[in-house]
Image (cartoon, grey):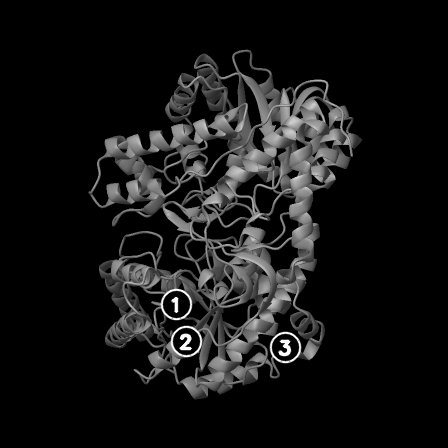
């Protein structure tokens, strides 16, 4: 294929970049500040150095226009809340006293004040802080962060484009503030919010911005006619401003649908659209509306969410088609590169052949630059790059790593009977109550206990050869003994072994399954200072040997109370990995489910009576468009049932989900056919309990009464109050008492105090129940 040069030289850009630094310097600086080991000035200096390094790396790679404003201490939606002055009343005093501490108080809470609710950013594993708005909300402009970071980039001699969350998406992400009637629609505040954006745009223009990007990813979801009307109003009003930079409206993660003609007609100077596989219909839709005559199109043809190398020739073909649909076409990744690790080149434990298949943020940046060069100067200018890319793609296609005939044969032999428990829930519930003999409102935790510095040091010592396997395992056994003893003393009813041996709830299993690859430096932000290293699912999946049985049975040997076996479910194993893109997700999920089924069966055979298979990503992976959801939910729930469907009726299957909007998947939660589900509920004030009740959910549930993403210790009375609210929706014989999520990220003292209060709350509320 030969491509002629574009009429106008294409520019290369990105929507955003990883924030943490090569060695997670930002995480260390922020946590040091929280712990009093660093000053605010030191934190700001670290952040400024990371921003400068990012911009200089991008510019050196050939990026013509660097993004500013995407950098954040915690979350870019929280930054937007600050930018528009929508600080909740309960946090205003803290923000006024110290802006930085007040910012972190909104994110994490304090002992006396609850934080903002946190949930997933669309269908990613990134979490954002939910804006709280009401009819009395007054917006005020604070452009200091955006202007300051733009000024920093311009001082380096760079062309820079500030990136803001757009006004429509911001309001669509918001929820009514506590005490505001549930029927309040934050979008009704658009008329109040637009003048604030106008003021910020004017400030950015005065600071030297030629373009400003307004991100509107909420438009790739199904939107009502009223919401599309609000969209048209927003960009009609902003476009009509005379004192503003040129506007680039960006959307990503899926197809735009009905929002595309609205934006195409809006008086803005450019659109940035996703043209990867997930949003392939955007190209046809753009042609159907007549393209973008007189406007700039930033074409996201490099996948910003997964780590496989781009098919350069395929992307160039897309770009060539787009040339006739806009005044100029520039090249970008599909979304912010926040969602991928920083640099594949630093990985030393991945075979060189496989490393050729991978592209992290720096490699994706180079792909964008290469495509822009090819689009601007023709394919002859990048002939060597295209040849190398063809070879990389071909080597992956024929690699034996990706194909295991035995795994594929087993998956093909699965029948409908394999994906269902043999007995209906009512029979199972009776058998489990008789076998487990638990009290009303049984107490438990989600699985993990705090990962101490001693545990992390032990793992590091083992990797470095400073201690042997026997010494390491004795440290793990000592931790399990301590965790079991604490839980018995506290009075928890169903115990956990604490997961001391696990580095991460997905990576731990990935390292023991065939077909997975692990990275050493592939850190990706999940929320705040919480970073994960998603493993790479590169080939067919099987389980060579038991993964958790030894530690679970050891814990059970220390107590007469039931100890839960703890596994990560098949959908979450996919969602929190960089999953292969060369076969349908349903096929990959079935392979993972069969591997987990082997583990479930072995746990039961070893005497484990309660087995929890976590699926926190079930809602996260839900397609953004309603039309795409039924097919996904069929294979996703089937995979869970395949993993758990072979156990006896008296073995109790639990699952867990957290930090997502559950209302639109309650039927899928029902279809999992788990005996008990635990869910995040503390920050959302037991909303999920009401949603389960409205659905008529027939099984047992534990809506969380302890928000583990905040360092505050909830009092016994606070937990009891949430529990009473839960009882308004779920009868006592089906209600469990538990935290929102695992305790891995919390400190020991706060964890112990919180769990003691949780158990005390359960005892108090049990005492209030009518005698039976």
Quadrant where the C terminus lies?
A: bottom left
Mark 1 falls on what kind of element? loop
CA neighbours of label 2 inside 10 A, class few (<14), some (14 to 19), many (20+): many
- Position above or below: 468 against 578: below
Classify mark 3: residues with Cα within 10 Å, few (<14), some (14-19) or many (20+): some
Name the residue located 38 percent from the left edge and 73 percent from the top edge.
441
Q: Residue at x 37, y 33 (%)?
A: 50
Q: Position of residue 121 (x, y in %)?
A: 51, 45
Which tag, 1 or 2, sits closer to the chain's start?
1
Name the one closer to the observer, 462 or 259. 462
Residue beneath disc 3: 420
- What residue does disc 2 label? 564
Which comes before the other along the chain, label 3 or label 2? 3
Q: Quadrant of residue 473?
A: bottom left
Compared to residue 552, the image places residue 758 above or below, namely above
- Identify the residue shown where x is 35% and y is 61%: 463
Q: Nearer the viewer, residue 430 or 747?
A: 747
The reply to whether dot 1 and dot 2 touch (C-beta < 8 Å) is yes
Residue 611 visible, this orientation: yes
- Distance between mark 1 and mark 2 Cα atoms: 8 Å
Q: Earlier in the sequence, mark 3 or mark 1?
A: 3
- In the image, 225 versus 566, the foreground residue is 566
Relative placement, left or right, of 699 versus 48 is right
Estimate the x, y position of residue 390 in percent, counting from the top left. Answer: 69, 43
Residue 318 placement, left or right of 705: right
Q: Residues within 10 Å of mark 1 (few under 14, many from 20)?
A: many
* Label 1 sits on residue: 447
Instruction: Verify CB contact (< 8 Å) between mark 3 and mark 2.
Output: no
Position of the N terminus, as image quadrant, is top right
Q: Secondary structure at mark 3?
A: loop
Q: Give the distance between the C-alpha atoms of the residues marked 3 and 1, in whole angstroms.
A: 25 Å
């Amino acid at each position: 294929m030969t491509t002629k040069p574009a009429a106008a030289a294409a520019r290369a850009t990105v929507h955003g970049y990883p924030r943490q630094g090569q060695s997670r310097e930002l995480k260390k600086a922020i946590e040091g500040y929280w712990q009093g080991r660093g000053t605010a000035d030191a934190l700001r200096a670290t952040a400024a150095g990371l921003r400068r390094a990012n911009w200089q790396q991008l510019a050196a790679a050939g990026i013509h226009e660097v993004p500013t404003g995407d950098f954040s201490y915690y979350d870019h939606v929280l930054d937007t809340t600050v930018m528009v002055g929508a600080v909740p009343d309960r946090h205003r005093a803290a923000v006024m006293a110290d802006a930085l501490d007040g910012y972190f108080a909104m994110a994490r809470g304090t002992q006396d004040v609850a934080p903002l609710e946190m949930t997933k950013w669309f269908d990613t594993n990134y979490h954002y802080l939910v804006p709280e708005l009401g009819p009395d909300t007054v917006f005020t402009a604070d452009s200091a962060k955006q202007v300051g970071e733009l000024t920093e980039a311009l001082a380096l001699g760079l062309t820079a484009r500030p990136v803001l969350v757009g006004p429509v998406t911001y309001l669509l992400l918001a929820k009514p503030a506590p005490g505001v009637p549930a029927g309040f629609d934050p979008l009704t505040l658009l008329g109040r919010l637009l003048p604030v954006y106008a003021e910020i745009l004017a400030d950015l223009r005065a600071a030297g911005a030629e373009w400003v990007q307004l991100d509107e990813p909420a438009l790739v979801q199904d939107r009502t006619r009223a919401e599309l009307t609000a969209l048209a109003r927003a960009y009609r009003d902003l476009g009509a401003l005379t004192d503003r930079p040129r506007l680039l409206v960006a959307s990503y993660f899926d197809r735009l649908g009905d929002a595309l003609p609205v934006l195409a007609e809006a008086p803005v100077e450019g659109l940035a659209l996703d043209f990867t596989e997930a949003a392939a219909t955007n190209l046809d839709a753009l042609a159907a509306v007549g393209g973008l005559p007189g406007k700039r199109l930033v074409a996201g043809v490099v996948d910003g969410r997964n780590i496989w190398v781009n098919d350069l020739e395929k992307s160039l073909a897309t770009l060539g088609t787009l040339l006739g649909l806009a005044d100029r076409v520039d090249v970008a990744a599909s979304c912010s590169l926040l969602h991928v690790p920083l640099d594949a080149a630093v990985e030393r434990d991945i075979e060189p052949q496989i490393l050729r298949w991978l592209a992290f943020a720096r490699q994706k940046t180079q792909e964008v630059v290469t495509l822009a060069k090819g689009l601007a100067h023709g394919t002859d200018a990048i002939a060597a790059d295209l040849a190398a890319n063809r070879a990389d793609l071909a080597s992956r296609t024929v690699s034996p790593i990706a194909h295991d005939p035995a795994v594929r044969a087993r998956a093909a032999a699965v029948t409908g009977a394999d994906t269902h428990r043999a007995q209906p829930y009512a029979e199972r519930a009776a058998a489990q109550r008789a076998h487990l003999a638990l009290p009303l409102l049984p107490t438990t935790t989600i699985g993990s206990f705090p990962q101490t510095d001693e545990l992390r040091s032990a793992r590091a010592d083992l990797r470095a050869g400073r201690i042997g396997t026997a010494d390491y395992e004795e440290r793990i056994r000592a931790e399990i003994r301590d965790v079991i003893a604490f839980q018995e003393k506290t009075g928890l009813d169903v115990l956990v072994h604490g997961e001391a041996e696990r580095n991460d709830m997905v990576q731990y299993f990935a390292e023991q399954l065939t077909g997975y690859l692990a990275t050493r430096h592939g850190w990706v932000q999940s929320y705040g200072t919480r970073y994960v290293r998603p493993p790479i699912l590169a080939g067919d999946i099987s389980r060579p040997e038991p993964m958790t049985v030894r530690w679970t049975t050891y814990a059970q040997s220390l107590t007469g109370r039931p100890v839960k076996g703890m596994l990560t479910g098949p959908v979450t194993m996919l969602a929190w990995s960089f999953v292969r893109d060369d076969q349908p997700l349903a096929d990959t999920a079935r392979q993972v489910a069969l591997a987990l089924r082997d583990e479930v069966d072995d746990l039961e055979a070893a005497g484990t009576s309660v087995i929890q298979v976590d699926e926190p990503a079930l809602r996260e992976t839900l397609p953004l468009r309603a039309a795409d959801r039924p097919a996904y939910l069929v294979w996703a729930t089937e995979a869970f049932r395949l993993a758990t469907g072979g156990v006896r009726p008296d073995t109790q299957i639990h699952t867990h989900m957290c930090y997502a909007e559950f209302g639109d998947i309650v039927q899928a939660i029902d279809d999992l056919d788990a005996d008990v589900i635990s869910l995040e509920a503390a920050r959302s004030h037991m909303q999920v309990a009401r949603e389960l009740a409205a659905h008529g959910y027939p099984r047992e549930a534990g809506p969380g009464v302890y928000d583990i993403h905040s360092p505050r210790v909830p009092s016994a009375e606070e937990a009891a109050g949430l529990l009473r609210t839960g009882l308004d929706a779920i009868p006592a014989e089906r209600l469990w008492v538990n935290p929102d999520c695992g305790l891995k990220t919390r400190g020991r003292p706060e964890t112990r105090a919180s769990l003691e209060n949780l158990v005390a709350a359960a005892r108090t509320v049990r005492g209030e129940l009518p005698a039976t």
